[in-house]
Amino acid sequence: MRLVLIAAALIATAAPAQRAPVPVDPFIGTGGEGHTFPGAVAPFGMVQLSPDTDTRCVIRDCYGHAAGYRYDDPTIEGFSHTHFSGAGHSDLGDILVAPVSGDDVPLEAGTPERPGYRSPYRKASEQARPGYYAVTLDRPGVRAELTAGRRIGVHRYRFPAGKAAHLVVDLRSSLYNYPGKVLWSGLRVRPGGTLTGFRETRGWAPGRKLFFAMRFSQPLTGHALLNRESDVPYKGFQGPGRGSDQVAERLGRALVARLDFGTLDRPLEVKVALSGVDEQGALANLASEAGNFDAIRARTSDHWAKALGVLDVAAPPAVRTNFYTALYHAMLAPSVWGDADGRYRGPDDQVHRADGFTYRSTFSLWDTFRALHPLLTLTQPERVNAEIVQSLIASRAASLDGILPVWQFHGRETWTMIGYHAAPVIADAYLKGIRGFDAQAALDAMVASASYAPYGGLGEYMARGYVPIDREPEAASKTVEYAYDDWTIARMAAAMGRPDVASTFAKRAGNWRNSFDVRTGFLRARKADGSWREPFDPTAINYGSDYTEGNAWQYSWFVPHDQAELFRQMGGNARVIAKLDRMFEFDNSTVDYSHAEDIAGLIGQYIHGNEPSHHVAYLYSYAGAPWRTQERLKQIVESQYRATPDGLSGNDDLGQMSAWFVFTALGFYPVAPGSNEYVLGRPFVDRATLNLPSGKQFTVTAEGLSDTNRYVAQVRLNGRPLPRGFIRHDEVMAGGTLAFTMAAQPNRRWATTPAERPFSASVAAAR
Amino acid sequence: MRLVLIAAALIATAAPAQRAPVPVDPFIGTGGEGHTFPGAVAPFGMVQLSPDTDTRCVIRDCYGHAAGYRYDDPTIEGFSHTHFSGAGHSDLGDILVAPVSGDDVPLEAGTPERPGYRSPYRKASEQARPGYYAVTLDRPGVRAELTAGRRIGVHRYRFPAGKAAHLVVDLRSSLYNYPGKVLWSGLRVRPGGTLTGFRETRGWAPGRKLFFAMRFSQPLTGHALLNRESDVPYKGFQGPGRGSDQVAERLGRALVARLDFGTLDRPLEVKVALSGVDEQGALANLASEAGNFDAIRARTSDHWAKALGVLDVAAPPAVRTNFYTALYHAMLAPSVWGDADGRYRGPDDQVHRADGFTYRSTFSLWDTFRALHPLLTLTQPERVNAEIVQSLIASRAASLDGILPVWQFHGRETWTMIGYHAAPVIADAYLKGIRGFDAQAALDAMVASASYAPYGGLGEYMARGYVPIDREPEAASKTVEYAYDDWTIARMAAAMGRPDVASTFAKRAGNWRNSFDVRTGFLRARKADGSWREPFDPTAINYGSDYTEGNAWQYSWFVPHDQAELFRQMGGNARVIAKLDRMFEFDNSTVDYSHAEDIAGLIGQYIHGNEPSHHVAYLYSYAGAPWRTQERLKQIVESQYRATPDGLSGNDDLGQMSAWFVFTALGFYPVAPGSNEYVLGRPFVDRATLNLPSGKQFTVTAEGLSDTNRYVAQVRLNGRPLPRGFIRHDEVMAGGTLAFTMAAQPNRRWATTPAERPFSASVAAAR
């Protein structure tokens, strides 16, 4: 609750240089398992400068600290420059900086009980808003403030009067750390006192390289560069200054720097740029963003105001905070990875140059193809989407396997999760009219990704029409996700006038049937001999099982491109509705999912904390019962989203959880990206205006919306009744008003006929 | 002896495509402790493709295998692409390739007793000539041939008929290896079958990066990329092809590749390019040198013929072989390090671009400032020297310490040995009229290097006029070498019209006196309080002692720029001559230098196998007894240089030992680079013509030279008697004939007066 008050206070006290026009609370999701971070970041910025409260975990124990920060942790180790927003797995936490005052400068973080440079802090001293974070570190007595630009982070430290000011820069610190993770690292004090360096790590991304340049507003009065490795069999020859640690360069696998500034009569500002290319790239990135802390903070605040201003929303305070925080969290990834000069390190670990676009990375595609990318297609159509697609195409060109990204960050592929979901991202953008990329190269990349036999059982899938579970794990999930991805390829190929490709992939789009067991009514894994794998337990969730982070309950609904045929195979709409109800009302007393990290936010077997369920509440509408969708959405929104640190029911997953909320709050959701249709749910805001790049506005209103008026009585589009349970993308882009009238009782007649149900028009095209 | 016959045979059988106009025997120095390699290399080429006979040693045991090959080893592990020629310490041996035939493909080298991919071979099957090496590997039954271009190496393997052909590429193999040396490495099979990869090592050069691209003349029919690490705590997610090792990319710290080609009906050619920049650089370097094995071999053979043709020499066969082999060994370093597009990785580990020159590295400056660089100044004045100096200046610009290279290879500084001997290299080039560089930047770099307090006790040296041994090891050697380097800076500054700099450094040039103990007549280490360090034993040799790889006997003669004053302090010429005799005739029966790797080639306390002695035989001439120099030179040449694998008495040290021989055989030697004077010794060749870039020729003749006619009776320059015991550089460059008349009895009157003695003219300038 306190945090909501802080957010509200921001609005009241907003000064021009630090205006916060909308109530964003970056602490939402920093408790529980939201895995967001509270630190400073620019929209889609390369640098996520944020406090790390605990990095002592080792790999599998790290889940709760995937973003480095947990709201309830009592101490802060320091501030590092890279964080994922809401990832389930993790890495990053690069280049930790910690202020230390006085003569004793500890070079180890220590523990909360025996702190080294780590410091306790009071929660009340914390402030967070888009592009700004502040906290008072009690141990050094330092007020610490953070802001960030496009490729830079800026620290400002107010040291206590009369005490020597120091910084510790610790290249050993990392998220999801373990002995041996740092492959090699370097620290270099350059003429003029700029600190540069690099780190190569063997983490989630194999062999990831990150370079940095760090400039100080006050002169360095001394420094020590140390290597804390104890087991180096060969140390080589020692350079100048061998008797001291005040060397110009130190290389090793356990580096830490002590930087001395003497006593200061003004705050110390530390400007840090990152680069994936080299230290020169970091220096150039540093030079490319002028200004001191206040100037950069004001600039980033403006950028956030503009970015968040794409939607003007009227809603009750908690909903409004949730809404804008979700919108904020949906504008962090895919983040900038290319340097100011266009160079970037790609999936082949080589340096390339982006020609006319900014290379972006951090693609959590299994999560974000669902709602995040469709949201960006609406809110950031040209600035972001063409660049995202261009980055995907460029990534494919530099892929040794010749395929599009799967789960990529900092330019490196991690091979996490399944599918080739860059395909729906690209197809959705193309079909919605985005053209800032080479469509032919994009289609080639999509076809190549869908045809690469060594990837995820694709060879078997192409030969048999399904992925056999005795040849490839998670076969059932792969089969249905491939089939959907194939459909998006067919849709784009058809739109491009490539009937050959369209025909091939339209046929593949039906492959989900090969894994659907009509007898049990569930998606199931099939063996190479055609038999179903036994035993079958639709509630079982295990890594590497028949399903990906889920079970038959969640995955049996994944045919977003052909729900009608799925429902027919399930026995018709009545059975579908009953089955959906069984799912939401399932008694979980006999199951235990504590072993599965990502299974959170359970409503029966509906698991909102993970993505496979995200479209399921909208399926009642496909079955002709939109009022049931309306009921379930209220149930989900109220139980899974709160404006508190632990308010997210599961990992935000680089904005997917948040994008779900933004769409759902607006009253429509992209169940099948690539269809150009949004299923109507029910709004959770009184009024929202989407400011389109054309200058037009698309406004959603919810007349009579209240806790009791939870049903849609009728819908009007531009004043005319809309009998359909969906709207088309072109209707949104044309501007206008989508007016919901809310009521306490369901309208059981609206949007119930086949023609009125979602996605009716394009179903035929899929078969 | 057999090798001389091979060399002679080469001449007789030389065909146009493989002409060997001069008898070079690359096996000379591959036995004993010469540390040369027999493999294929182009003049100053980036790639030294050569067999490694044993890489199983661990660091300090590796001395004998510093170049990877020992002539007497019974097996060959494979062929790697980088080697030092004659280094004392080592590293490299990058990217080992071994051919394997048949179905069983071992991925470990094994031991000579239990070979894996290692193979026995017969010495008679070996051939080596400039740019070409061949051997028959008995285990796979493969005839292996190697050649090299500027940035490429080319292998040609003839596999036995009907047996499957494979290559093993082992990124674990290294010279001076140890567990943990490979920091990270990668192998990537690119579309089309090109193998690329990289290796980062923590060896002599800290954090050295090397990239490669490898193209095959026959299609890859299969491959396996394996990581043999056993102790990886976190393996991350697995990419496409997880069930097989036929993956497109493998990263790790213990990589080995198996490459399959099926049965071949023609030889397999493997073209490999290196780059210090990135894999794209390696691919571009690969593309920049067209042609198959035979074409590249012919081209490199032409380059060698041209390079070695700078000197036309008539001499007895063994002398001629020694001479041209020495000239060959003097044209390997500083080797090309920059890519074809000009980019290179510099001392700051960052990628730079050379503007208008080729960046070179492998600077063994403590060794090579003495005779190698002066030889290159004569034989490669514009093509090499300006580039060398430009590379030195560029290296300084990218030095975090702001100083010139000390012992640099692959762009990285190793901080090995002492002094700032890039200064005499640059000054010597400048004073000899080479101008293809920015002289002001060069002088700035020299002054900066000589003024950088943290380096090697320079702060103390500048404050006290000597390096105090209680503050800095090897203080006596450092003091005298700094003083000499200072003199070269003064000389160049004076020539550039910078009397301020000249005056400062001319004063510093006299600092050797502060470390010379007139009482004992030896150079000694002095403590900060001004006292001499006790006890004093002029025969003691220990690492980190008062001297660098030597003792007071060798180091007390190192005042090349002011021998006259040194001799005065030693008590006059008669005492000097007696002392030199004591040195050469010292009874070593009571000393043991087996602990000191580089102490080899002992004639009393004269140690020809290491550099501090190299000018000493010429000092008799300074003392007015040139006939004694003539005697000592004969003694040294006959005992220290033989045309056999173990024919070099010590490490060739990147060509310094060889350059000493070339100069000495020609009858003159640059005792004091920077003086523009060469001290006359006595020729060991009947006639030699130096083809100058101007088209002029400078010819040395030795009339009557024989084993008994070992003294110089008289010298004529261009037909006129030359009373001096030295010649000037401009006299050489003007072309003409330096005619020695040899006799059985010494001429005790020639070149004995002060004015006739070496270096008389510039002595005054030094004080």
Image: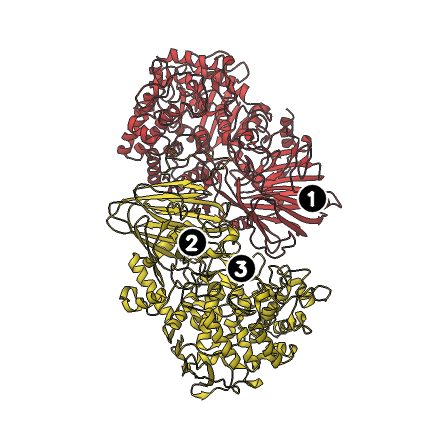
Chain colours: A yellow, B red
Determine the chain carrying the residue at label 1: B
Instruction: Check chain identity for marks 1 and 3: say if they share one.
Output: no
Instruction: Identify the element where label 3 is drawn.
Output: loop
- Amino acid at pointer 2: Ser
Instruction: Identify the element where label 2 is drawn.
Output: strand
Tell me which label, 2 or 3, sits earlier in the chain: 2
| Image: B465 above or below A589 | above
Instruction: Check chain identity for marks 2 and 1: say if they share one.
Output: no
The answer to whether A739 appears left or right of B291 in the picture is left
The residue at which mark 3 appears reads as A597
User: Where's residue B607, x and y in %?
Assistant: 48, 20
User: In percent of the image, x 39 and y 62: which residue is there?
Assistant: A27
Q: Nearer the viewer, residue A552 or A671?
A: A552
Determine the chain carrying the residue at label 3: A
The residue at which mark 2 appears reads as A275
Q: Around disc 2, counting alpha carbons within 10 Å, would you say few (fewer than 14), some (14 to 19), or many (20 or more)?
A: many
Instruction: Check chain identity for marks 2 and 3: say if they share one.
Output: yes
The total of numbered circles placed on residues is: 3
Q: Which mark is residue B105?
A: 1
Residue B34 in view (yes/no): yes
**Given this view, does label 1 or label 3 mark the residue nearer the observer?**
3
Mark 2 and mark 3: span between their CA atoms?
Answer: 32 Å
Q: Nearer the viewer, residue A583 or B485?
A: A583
- Amino acid at pointer 1: Val
Q: Nearer the viewer, residue A5 or B693?
A: A5
Q: Are marks 2 and 3 in contact (CB under 8 Å)?
A: no
**Given this view, does label 2 or label 3 mark the residue nearer the observer?**
3
The answer to whether A215 appears left or right of B744 in the picture is left
Q: Residue furthest right?
A: B162
Quadrant containing the N terminus of chain B in the rendered view = top right
